[in-house]
Amino acid sequence: VQLQASGGGSVQTGGSLRLSCAPAGRTFSSYRMGWFRQAPGKERALVASIGRTSRSAEYVDSVKGRFTISGDGAKSTSTLEMNSLKPEDTAVYYCATKRDPFGAYEGWGQGTLVTVSS
């Protein structure tokens, strides 16, 4: 089980990016899908997650109102729309899947780099 994140890039403060996530190989289903990010010198942290049926989206406070997660749990595909980007959003972004309610997130790929300049 492995996912591939794409869509990162360099933008100025206030800009937007759309990240995409899809299985790197065979298609599989997810109970919940998440987007994480790891800034330089910091631990990887959950940014947003969404349930299998695209309901119950959750966000970390720092991105609420700016980021929107959507996805298809049957295919384990998801997108993260990022608006009003700030320099503190600079990080490598990863997507991951939780296959059941009790499991840990898995399927980490290489991530995609988002750089926001002031």
Image: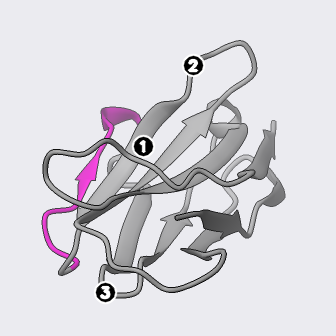
For the C terminus, the image quarter is top right
**Element type where label 3 sits in the image:** loop
Is there any visible trace of residue 43 in the rendered image?
A: yes
Q: Nearer the viewer, mark 1 or mark 3?
A: 3
Which residue position holds label 3?
Answer: 74
Task: Report x, y in % for residue 39.
Answer: 68, 27
Which residue position holds label 1?
Answer: 47
Q: What span is in magenta? A: 54-62
Which residue position holds label 2?
Answer: 43
Is there any visible trace of residue 17 in the rendered image?
A: no
Task: Report x, y in % for residue 81.
Answer: 51, 68
The amino acid type, in three-letter code, at marker 1 is Val
> Residue at (33%, 47%) from the top-left corner?
64
Q: Residues within 10 Å of mark 1 (few under 14, many from 20)?
A: many
Tell me if residue 33 comes above or below residue 13 in the rendering.
below
In this rendered view, identify the residue nearer to me: 99 or 116: 99
Task: Report x, y in % for residue 17.
Answer: 67, 66
